[in-house]
Amino acid sequence: MSSATPQIPRVRRRPHGRHRSQGRRMGRRLPLAGVLRLGRPADIWFKPALSVVASVAPPNLTLLALGRLDLAMYTMAGSLCALYAHNRPYAARGRALAWVVLGMLGGLAVALTAASLTTNAVVLVTVGALLAAVQKALCDATRIGPPGHVVLAFISSASLFVPQTLGQVPGHLALGAAAGAWAWIVGMAPGLVRPHGPERRATAHALNAAAAYTETAGTGDGAARARAAAAAAVHGAWQSLLSTGARSAPRRALERLVVRAEVAIAAPADTEPERLRAWAREVRGAGPVPRPDDLGEAADELLGVEAELAVPPTPLFRRLGPLAPIALRTALGCALAGYASLALGVGRPYWALVTAASLYQANVTLTWSRGVQRVVGNLIGVLCFAVLAPLAHLSEAFLVLLCLALNFGAEALIGRNYWLGSICVTPMALLITEFARVQQPGELMTDRVADTLVGAVVGFAAAVAVTNRRAGDRIEGALDAVERARERAVGLLDAERPDPGALESARRALSGAVVELRATADAAAGEWWQRALPEERVMRAEQSGHRTLAATVRRQGLHSLEGAQA
């Protein structure tokens, strides 16, 4: 149940001289056009789809053979961990998947313990809302999505309402841990065949994005957007390459290609986009990584990777601080949605809770879009369940096979738009409730529709009510980071003989700061109830940052190398 990567609306820039530095933005029009538009399928859409089937099938089929399909809820908790970290190099993926499994088991443990200690629905909803808020904050801080916190919240919230005794908790957790271990193996298995697959995909994406920008020659209406996309792709490629310490020969070759993509961004008019696209095609294949030989023996010194690997990551608590408003939105929205569901007499308030939890994105505008997608997908999914329920009631084997097919369909489709994947997620969630016992389809469908509408309305209301004033503060921090990174790069440029590794490291730091500024500004642009954004300062900072990046390329001699090769 991944979630499609949201498209953050870009800041609308005002003409020079009309910028408002004071006042507050009280709100903005909520978009409808384009919310349901289908995007292109992800490059590796089939990998999470196949992985989740390979992870879910053995435990469920084993329980089916044993006649204990009622225990599938606990094995599903571990099996669904196979959805995560498909974009990370395998060393980093192994660590990330281990933490996901531990996080899933931690949430499951809290939920099962609470379910065994009380049957008070208000208390259980409150516990579920707090768990969802913690899961949302941790997933956003560690960037462990997609699917982020939604799958974790689904499992923990549903488990709160499963009848339980305290003595059963360890055994049920053991089932989840065993399935989680199998999911870890499934997630890591492709590394035996294609050990550098994620890094190669990230590098190819950077090359293609750079080629798209060079086709604009740095001019025209779409140049700024293409440049921002290319810079983000290059930054993502470096993050992939720097996430593991070992620098093998293929890794070094990929680093050289990412440098080439950076050169193209700095000098689009002097770069042939077809060469970049040809390299991207070769990188995506199974053959050797192409090597731009003109960098020569100075490439390793130029890259300055070793110094960057030695820099410690930002502490987790510092990353959690700016997410406090989003976590508060999640806790409040999930709790109120669950309480409202209880007040209406719906028998499964955790569906309203999970609906609310699934809405919360980087800002109010994106949260609205996700709400529309969720409601549309769930309503169509309920109709699909009405068609599939008679088949599921033929036998437990049909029930398991249908759930596997829906698992695959959800992951295959959700990358194109969240609502499309929800069409498969919704009947799958309804069918999972029948693992323990056969239920009335009409009752399930009525509860699901009611909880979807309650969760979407109440969840969005909480997003509007809980202001995120820190969005503006984060822009100020991002502007300061760009200025510090630019001053460092300029200082090295002014030196008579700057250290090549230091200059390259400064260039990448500045590139990352510019990318982060754009992402922060785009997120703040969709937020309500905050002071006016410093749009012109952001634009000037981006422009000066890109000019400095181009100057570092020229100083390093990479521009002349590219021109000579062209």
Image: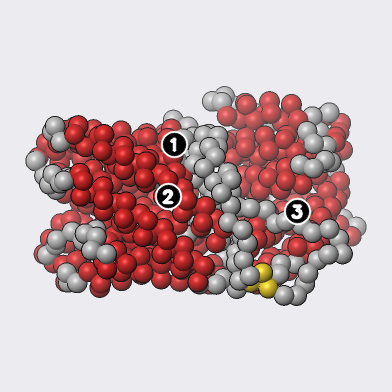
Crowd band around label 2 with a 10 angstrom C-alpha radius: few (<14), some (14–19), many (20+): many
CA distance for labels 1 and 3: 38 Å
Circle 1 residue: 413
What residue sits 80% from the left and 36% below the top? 216
Front of the two marks 2 and 1: 2
From this viewpoint, which residue is outermost toward the bottom?
22
Crowd band around label 1 with a 10 angstrom C-alpha radius: few (<14), some (14–19), many (20+): many
Quarter of the figure with residue 387? top left
Q: Amino acid at mark 2?
A: Arg
CA distance for labels 3 and 2: 41 Å
Circle 3 residue: 507
Q: Is residue 419 left or right of residue 468?
A: left
Residue 263 against residue 552 in the figure, above or below: above
Which of marks 3 and 1 precedes in the sequence? 1
Circle 2 residue: 374
Crowd band around label 3 with a 10 angstrom C-alpha radius: few (<14), some (14–19), many (20+): many
Front of the two marks 3 and 2: 2
Element assignment for label 1: helix
Quarter of the figure with residue 102? bottom left
Residue 549: image location, x then y, percent: 80, 51
